[in-house]
Image (cartoon, rainbow, N blue to C red):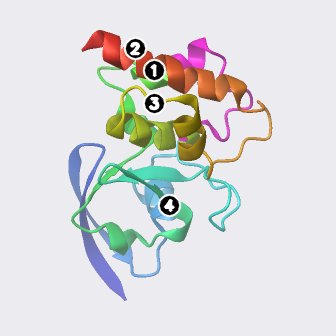
Amino acid sequence: MKTILELTLNGRPRQDLVADNLLLLDYLREVAGLTGTKRGCDGGECGACTVLVDDRPRLACSTLAVQVAGKRVETVEGLVRGGRMSRLQQAFHEKLGTQCGFCTPGMIMAAEALLRRNPDPGRDEIKAALAGNLCRCTGYVKIVEAVEAAGGATEAAE
């Protein structure tokens, strides 16, 4: 069976005919052409596929595309405004929060959800928000520092 999927993707309305069993991850990568969202474990354990659905983090590898009908979906590409990285993306760059970069989109989206709820989170809150996202390269210190920097910058900018 197929369904016409209507959603808002990175701020733009979309309509696509999709198979009822198509994963959100495959919809984003293959139908929408947004390859920032990564396929990691394919079992909901690594967080590399984290996107925001109505401002809440969600694993795209364990969500059917039809489950986000009528919702707002945001990917890491959607954080860029006017060709410029978001404050959080810039903080990851400046604080060396990436190494191989594979986990980075999922980390950024989980952190973005946190910063929308709390613009100046403490270290423990950051660690809790990122607990579902695994990184094999950095040891997490620089990632936490990047989120702290973006949080402080958010408060200072407003």
Classify mark 1: helix, strand or loop. helix
Q: Position of residue 103 (x, y in %)?
A: 65, 41
Tell me where the magenta segment starts and ends, as one range: 91-105
Judged by depth in the image, the label closer to the viewer, 1 or 3, is 3
- The circle drawn on residue 13 is none
Q: Are marks 3 and 2 in contact (CB under 8 Å)?
A: no
Q: CA distance from mark 4 to mark 1?
A: 25 Å
Q: Is residue 95 visible?
A: yes
Judged by depth in the image, the label closer to the viewer, 3 or 2, is 3
Instruction: Tell me if mark 2 has few (under 14), some (14-19) or many (20+) residues whose alpha carbon lies within 10 angstroms of its own.
Output: some
Q: CA distance from mark 3 to mark 2?
A: 12 Å
Q: Quadrant of residue 54?
A: bottom left
Q: Earlier in the sequence, mark 2 or mark 4?
A: 4
Residue type beneath disc 3: Pro
Q: Earlier in the sequence, mark 3 or mark 2?
A: 3
Question: Seen in the image, is 143 located left or right of residue 137?
Answer: left
Q: Quadrant of residue 72?
A: bottom left
Residue type beneath disc 2: Ala
Q: Residue under circle 1? A: 150
Instruction: Tell me if mark 1 has few (under 14), some (14-19) or many (20+) residues whose alpha carbon lies within 10 angstroms of its own.
Output: many
Q: Residue under circle 4? A: 60
Q: Residue under circle 3? A: 121
Instruction: Tell me if mark 4 has few (under 14), some (14-19) or many (20+) residues whose alpha carbon lies within 10 angstroms of its own.
Output: many
Q: Residue under circle 2? A: 153
Q: CA distance from mark 1 to mark 3?
A: 10 Å
Classify mark 3: helix, strand or loop. loop
